[in-house]
Image (cartoon, coloured by chain):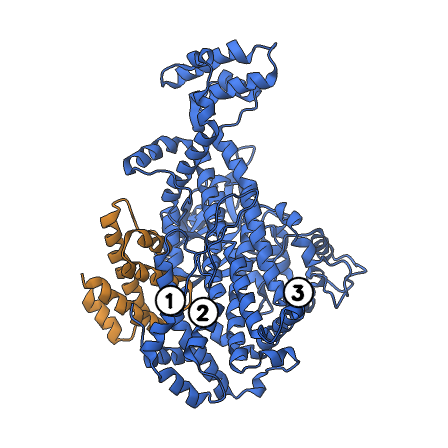
Amino acid sequence: MDKKDFENKLKNKKIDECVSILRKELIEILTKKIQEKDKYFRYSTTKDLHNKAKICLKQQYSEIASRLYNFDIMYELDEYKLDEMLEMYKILSKE
Amino acid sequence: MKIRDFFSTLNFSISILNDRNNEDVRNFEDNFDDIMRSSIEYIRRLAEDNADALSEDYDIDDLVLDDYDYISDETFQNTDIYAISMKYIASKYLNSHRYLIPELEKEIEERGLVFREEESYIDDFHENLVTALLALKHDYEENYGDLLEEIPEEVASVLRVGTEQSEKEEAFKRLYNQYGNATMVPYNVRRNVMMMGYYSLFGLQGLDSNNGSQSSLKIKNSFHMKDYIQGYVERLEPVYKTEIVNSILSMVYQLDRFGEIYEKIEAHNDRMRRYGLPGLGYQSDEKEIYPKLPRFERLMTEENLMKQNIDDLLALNAFYNNRFAKIMNEYALALFVIGNLDMTQRCVDGEEITKSRLTQNKLNMLVTKYQTLILPIKQYYAEEQSKIQDNPYVFVEDATEFEVSSEEDSRVKKQIEIDPSSFIKRVTKAWRNDYKDYYNLRLPDVENNLEDDLAFVNILYNPIFLSYRFKHDSIKAVYAYLDFLSKEEPNRSLNFGIVLGNYNDNRKNNILLAFDGLLDSTVRLHMDKEEFKDFLMAQTGSTDIRMFIGFEDFYFGGEYISSQLVAPQCKEHEKFLKVVKNGSISKEFPSVRVTPINERFLQHAEYNMNKTKFMPAHKITTIKKNKKGKLVQEAVQPVMKYNMDTAKKYIQREDGEFVEEAEFNSLNDIGDLEV
């Protein structure tokens, strides 16, 4: 993730673009974590990601995958998504 | 994840209320009186139907909650549609691309994959091929494993050959000469021996009709032997159809319980009358003005639905899932308001709740309260969802594990008990007294008990959550199936895909998809853009999406006509269209005629009924050679694709290839040709 670009977008209140960037980033991190357990896994959709995360990842990460999937299927405010995704990003980037 | 504190949750809830893109809240506010009236009618019907069950210990509020559990159970029964759709598509694909099987078998071996009872079908097409092949092989071994082990030695000796195709075919012919052609032996015995030989020699892939010798294929056909994979796909079809039909019927039944079907029939009839097309309506119980109209219930019987094509059934399923999800959202909010006002019993007794009775401030506060509770509940669902391994669809409150089985389907569906009490405790701890203090001040005449409110919203949210998941799955299923058909049966006229133009709603993250079929209306549904783009990649390997042609036909004099109800086509509507088109004077419909307002809609409907090759308003011309070898222009219905990344449009050429729109137009512009 280009952090500078992200920060600029955040500063300019381009919330939907920030959400899109974070979504991609979170997917990438989770995909890598799953691939550590199953080298054949490749990302297709958040639905598949969340189903696979349940099997391969610890609950905290699996929960993030579920949240990402739910964001895709249920309407949520962009500001809320961004806030939640930043929290998820914090958790995932801790390790 | 940790629970967000009360005031931060509240801030988001207030933003949701002010968010004009939020269709659910906006719709609830705009149509408050109608939604409230329908919800109260639902409560009254429920009370009436269960009058004997009501007592001092079991009141109407308990009954509503139990009914919501029942709705969740019913919704849960439709979980298989997505998986079986993906399985059917993958199995059909394997049947028509059998050359892929050896390669996939190699992959299965390398990855050490084995068949699992709970076949897991996902959005990834390749993974689905692998899963479908594992299931197919398992089925083959289950059915023929023993048989192939018990082949009599004299037959086995004939079959003991090398791996070359020619050697196998020679052995097959020898078997025929020795056993299959022994006319003194009864046919069924000979057939058994030939089948043993056939499956033993050619396996589940069968004899490749492109490479197999004519004599071998002739022997195979003389015993009416199907390749195993072909027979397997044929066996899947009725099971698949039954599942979809059951899902449609259960959704329609639920909608009918909420009074939605009747309302939509009325709304549909009103519109059709307004635009001079009364014969495209349905028979309504109260206003039997047009005796020749079909009854909606008659079109939606199991018998009639089972006669329809799979693609049309999938489109119907997606339409009713979508409608159900929307209704669940509306009713949850309405029931929350009624419950909070402690008016459930009073509504049964005849009281009404209208916007004029409530102050805007009170209504806003109740909606905000609902949203404040929904946000942690959504988190709770994500937590539970992430724990359960066997089945992602397990959200039935206080349900003990139970089994559902039928004659056709012995698979077991599990619902696992989940208990929200510990989650509620966590929220209560995080929010301390803030919730009570805040709402007691603003809603003083309402019981603001956080634990009870969370438990109530949890039950209301259950069918919403399930129906939204199925809604997305059902849209994916119909798109995937139609995309598959468009490739497997290129000559079939199909109109489906993304709607471009100014038709996508305010939600910038959404796309609008539409599906035509042998249905009396077009199915139109919204889907998250990012999710659908990922899905396309996973299914087809690109972000090209088919384009729906003719969406503008649904604008009548500038007003967009949405589909209120969708049913399979019927002879009454077909007859009416004929009357309109021919301009004939009909006793039932004396004043109908084609007008500039309804003309394009009628052309679209005719095209859907396979009465025309193209919709005149959307035709294009392509160049082809006629029988004499002369180049001529021919009017056709365009088949178009749109790339979701580059926003480029492509048109299909005569040879099936897609070329960019500009290139297509220049290729087809070669002066005055015969048309």
Pointers 2 and 1 in contact (CB under 8 A)? Answer: yes
From the viewer's perspective, tell me whether residue B395 is left or right of residue B634.
Answer: left
Depth check: give the residue in front, A82 or B438.
B438
What secondary structure is marked by label 1?
Answer: helix
Residue sitting at the far front: B57
Q: Is residue A43 above or below residue B218?
A: below
Whole-percent x, y for residue B557 in the image: 60, 69
Residue B232 image offset from top left, x and y in percent: 50, 34
Earlier-in-chain disc, 1 versus 3? 3
- B432 to B121, vertically: above or below: below
Instruction: Kindly identify the amino acid type of the residue bearing the numbered disc 1.
Output: Tyr
Badge number at residue B380:
1
Q: Quadrant of residue A4?
A: bottom left
Q: Which residue is mark 3?
A: B265
First in sequence: mark 3 vs mark 2: 3
> Which residue is at 29% across, 47% downward?
A41
Visual hue assigned to chain B:
blue
Q: Callout 2: helix, strand or loop? A: helix
Judge if badges 2 and 1 mark residues of a common chain: yes
| Spatial CA span between label 3 and label 2 | 32 Å
Q: Are marks 3 and 2 in contact (CB under 8 Å)?
A: no
Gap between marks 1 and 3 measured at Cα: 38 Å
Q: Amino acid at mark 3?
A: Ile
Choose the circle earlier in sequence order: 2 or 1.
1
Task: Out of B669 and A76, give the one closest to the viewer.
Answer: A76
Label annotation for residue B458:
2
Q: In the rendered picture, chain A carries what hue?
A: orange
Q: Are marks 3 and 2 on the same chain?
A: yes
- The answer to which of A33 and B652 lies nearer the viewer is A33
Kind of residue at disc 2: Asn
